[in-house]
Image (cartoon, rainbow, N blue to C red):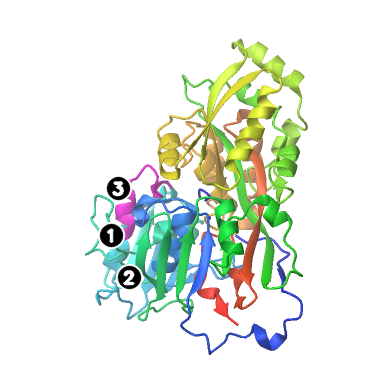
Amino acid sequence: MRSVRMRILAGLLVLAAAGIGGWQLLPSQENNGKTVRVGTTDTVTSLDPAGAYDAGSWALFSNVFQTLVTFEPGGAEPVPDAAKSCGFQGTSLRTYRCRLRDGLQFPSGRKMTAEDVKFSFDRVKRINSDVGPASLLSTLKSVDADGMTVTFHLSSADATFPFKVATGAGSIVDHTRYPSTSLRKGTAVDGTGPYELSAYTKGREAVLKPYGAYEGAVKPGPPVELRYYADGEALDKAWKGKQVEVATRELPPKVLAGLNPSDPGERVSEDDSSETRNLYFNTRKGSPLHDVRVRKAMAWLIDRDQLAATVYDGTVDPLYSLIPTGITGHTTSFFDAYPKPDPKQARKLLTEAGVSLPVRFTYGYGLGSGSAADEAKEIKRQLEATGLFQVTVKGYEWTDFQKRWATGKLDAYAVGWVADYPDADTFAAPLVGTDGTMNTGYSNKTVDHLIKDSQQYPDRGEVAQDFRDLQVTVAADVPVIPLWQRKEYVVTTEDIGGGQYLAEGDGIFRLWKLTWI
């Protein structure tokens, strides 16, 4: 999922403020009904699940919509949510069937049926929004509905399909309230999640109240005001000004680096994360980065250690793999191919390519996306220091930025990626598969074959070699350069518990886990 969507890594560290007694960590009955204010720099692209494939939108979806299955905190396998049960039929991994819970109802009072599920999946594929999640359902051929039973027919074996059903792409909507061929306009939402969206102002706030008719895998939490801030500095100001009780995704790097668990009045949760950030290239003919030798030259010049140390104050780790540390299939393919910055190797490749120097191209990023602006300046500095490249950097409002890369209008663009589900597949098909969501124009038959082959293994521990081979090919073709892997930080006031469960990098934003203590 595009960032700004697994805590699969070990090492959860919850740092509580000193002096808090164990009895105070229990939920307070006295504060039931009191609103928790949560601050974030996430951006919501759309309130319609068919029109958004990004972390900010999916964070909201996971609270106001239900999916047939979901992930428990730290879980690697989906469990029933709107469904009573789900499973593959037979051994071919091409037919997946779910039986809905009884008694699910939308805010209108209408009961959910399998027809709503079929409608929801069909419309995602039918609308096929440029910035929507249709590509995630590429193996879905058709859906059948029969009363409370829904059956998915797949075009090829896909052991990862249950994971995809648990994502924002699987959000179930009321088929009587959503148009079948276009996105729903306005701010109304009709879902059956643990919260109702009672008010929404784009770019400012989403007001959520517990949904009284909710039936599912979780227990609804306190009322929440989700407040959106333009950048990390604005979020930090709101946190210090006590305008929010929770700050997450993402305070400025200098602030994160200076967090101290002994500071009075706050709790700090720091956890490993599978969120990554990559530099993508438009590989199509006509792009200044079409020639693979030009992209390889750039790979020889990017200094990740410098980027992590200066722009991010050590709050991210340099990444040399498309698949992050802690996920099956992780390797160091980009380190193996380009072990350290080497301007001589870069110049040699550009000379062989016969291109005019400096190579000129545009670099785009999303405004308000953490430290994206400072990151862009540093990458520009590294590439231009050699005299081999001239980079025009420009930031765009998030929705405009998405549409520009989706329509091939940018030569290069940096985008964060949060796992859609806890499996290496989410870092492969959407990012480097033919017609993937990052829309680089890249297509390689070997890569596509390895992706499809990996989907045939129910035991996901058996896919490591496919993904290692895939990454060797990607490092040779360079449609993307991995930059860094993030750590997850959540800061709360001392009277808020559950912050460590809020954002685990699996696309689910667990607002219901927050409690007053």
Q: How crowded is mark 1: few (under 14 residues within 10 Å), some or many (20 or more)?
A: many
Q: How far apart are marks 3 and 2 (CA)?
A: 24 Å
Q: How far apart are marks 3 and 1 (CA)?
A: 12 Å
Q: How crowded is mark 2: few (under 14 residues within 10 Å), some or many (20 or more)?
A: many
Q: Residues within 10 Å of mark 3 (few under 14, many from 20)?
A: some
Assess whether residue 262 is covered by the magenta stretch. no
- Vertical position of residue 137 compared to residue 214: above or below: above
- Asked if the residue under mark 2 is in contact with the one under mark 3, i.e. CB atoms within 8 Å, the reply is no
Name the residue carrying label 3: 127
Which one is earlier in the sequence, the residue at label 3 or at label 1?
Answer: 1
Residue 359: image location, x then y, percent: 59, 17
Name the residue carrying label 1: 119
Q: What is the residue that sits farthest to the front in this orientation?
A: 241
Name the residue carrying label 2: 149
Which element is circle 2 on?
strand
Amino acid type of the residue that numbered disc 3 sits on in the rendered structure: Ile
- Callout in the foreground (3, 2): 3
- Callout in the foreground (1, 2): 1
Which element is circle 1 on?
helix
- Vertical position of residue 308 compared to residue 188: above or below: above
Amino acid type of the residue that numbered disc 2 sits on in the rendered structure: Thr
* Placement of the C terminus among the 4 image quadrants: bottom right
Q: In which quarter of the image is residue 147?
A: bottom left
Amino acid type of the residue that numbered disc 1 sits on in the rendered structure: Phe
Residue 258: image location, x then y, percent: 74, 57
Which element is circle 3 on?
helix
In this orientation, does residue 83 appear?
Answer: no
At x 62% / y 15%, what residue is drawn? 358
The residue range painted magenta reads 119-135
